[in-house]
Image (cartoon, grey):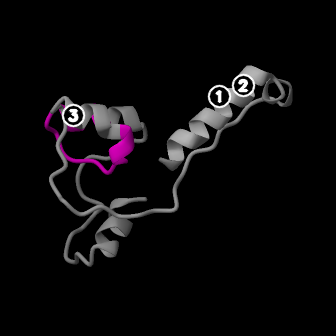
Amino acid sequence: MGWEQWLGKLGVTGIDSRRGPRFSDYYQAVQAAIAGQGVLLGSRLVMKDLITSSLLVTPFPEGVQTDLGYDVIASRGAAERPEVLAFIHWIAGQALT
């Protein structure tokens, strides 16, 4: 989700979301935000440790639900191993809580 979509879901108008620095690498965008060079859109779950340690803050109380998610991917051979299956079941359970 980009700024335009995020602002639109909140009903915010009059902001040119194309202005300002842009990064093709998410890690660079995170580091720029930590350095005080702007703001970024991110998942609170992914940013949790950075927020807890006060390296980043959530300046807006609003959040936006998206249909973005994560996939667990493994080779066919690995996916049949008991320890990999156990991990897949564990991580799926963590994602649902």
Q: Nearer the viewer, residue 34 or 43?
A: 43
Residue 39 position in % (x across, y down): 21, 47
Q: Which mark is residue 63?
A: none
Distance (Cα) linking label 3 and label 1 = 26 Å
Residue 40 point in image, percent of width and height: 28, 48
In this rendering, the answer to whether 45 lies above or below 12 is above
- Identify residue for label 2: 84
Residue 96 left/right relative to 3: right
The image quarter in which residue 9 lies: bottom left
Amino acid identity at mark 2: Val
Q: CA distance from mark 3 to mark 2?
A: 30 Å
Q: Is 22 drawn above or below residue 80 in the view shown?
A: below
Amino acid on which the number 3 mark rests in the picture? Thr
Q: Do labels 3 and 1 touch, CB within 8 Å?
A: no
What span is in magenta? 30-46
The answer to whether the residues at label 3 and label 2 have Cβ atoms under 8 Å apart is: no
Residue labelled with disc 3: 52
- At label 1, the amino acid type is Phe
Query: How dense is the environment of label 3, judged by Cα within 10 Å: few (below 14), some, or many (20 and up)?
Result: few
Quadrant of res 32: top left
Task: Give how far across and how far down residue 75 sits, in percent.
Answer: 80, 29
Residue at the spot of label 1: 87
Q: Is residue 44 left or right of residue 37?
A: right
